[in-house]
Amino acid sequence: MQENNPAPSPEPGSVAAGASGQEDRNQRYWFHILAQNTPAARNLHAAKLVDKAWQQGDRVCVVCDTMQHAEELDDLLWNFSPDAFIPHSVVPDSATTCSDPVGILLHPPAPEDWDTVIILSATLPADANRFKRLALVAHNDPNVLNQARSHFKQLRALGIEPRVHDQRKRG
């Protein structure tokens, strides 16, 4: 699916009017494939999604694999907007409670704790079908794209057809 708008889309919380139950469910799962091939571009896209969801009142988490990646996102969110602060914290393990509306997690998120989940990790949570909204972000790197294909297959196995936003197809 092509988009003409460079902003991350669709907006968290948006659902097609008059859609069936399955279509409503699929509207909550998005796959963003970036034209850029850098981790920095992937982090920036995730930060834009975080900001949009948080501005709409969602509790948002981003799932990472390493503390280094979490710290990169932490720095990016601290400096994301010169006139706004996105309240967030790094959550290293499931025993640590996140009181901020945005969490950068190094463990699988609990579906009941988060409205929007953004996956940047190599592992898709086993209960991904239980999240209110889920966004997967991949940059145009062969290893990351293979990981994204694996996530896509896992979602399909859970009965989810995520909406794909492939920015590589833009003119």
Image (spheres, rainbow, N blue to C red):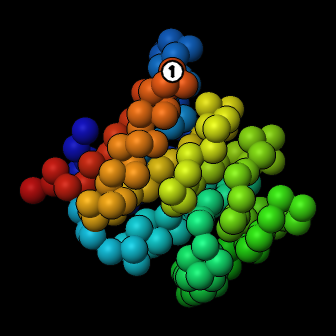
Count of number-bearing discs: 1
Q: Residue at x 67, y 35 (%)?
A: 127
Against 132, is 88 above or below?
A: below
- In terms of secondary structure, where does tag 1 sit? loop
Q: Position of residue 113 (x, y in %)?
A: 80, 48
Q: Position of residue 2 (x, y in %)?
A: 22, 44
Pick out the residue farthest to the top.
20
- Closest to the observer, 13 or 63: 63
Q: Which residue is drawn at 36% across and 43% down?
A: 149
Q: Position of residue 98 (x, y in %)?
A: 84, 64
Residue 10 appears in view? no
Local crowd at mark 1 within 10 Å, few (<14), some, or many (≥20)? few
Indicate left or right for 90 with 68 as reference: right
Q: Which residue is drawn at 51% across and 57% down?
A: 122
Residue 15 appears in view? yes
- The quarter of the image holding the N terminus is top left
- Closest to the observer, 119 or 170: 119
| Type of amino acid at the residue the image marks with label 1 | Gly
Indicate left or right for 157 with 7 as reference: right
Q: Which residue is drawn at 67% across and 58% down?
A: 61
User: Which residue does the numbered mark 1 point to in the structure image?
Assistant: 159
- The quarter of the image holding the C terminus is bottom left
Q: Position of residue 55 (x, y in %)?
A: 64, 60
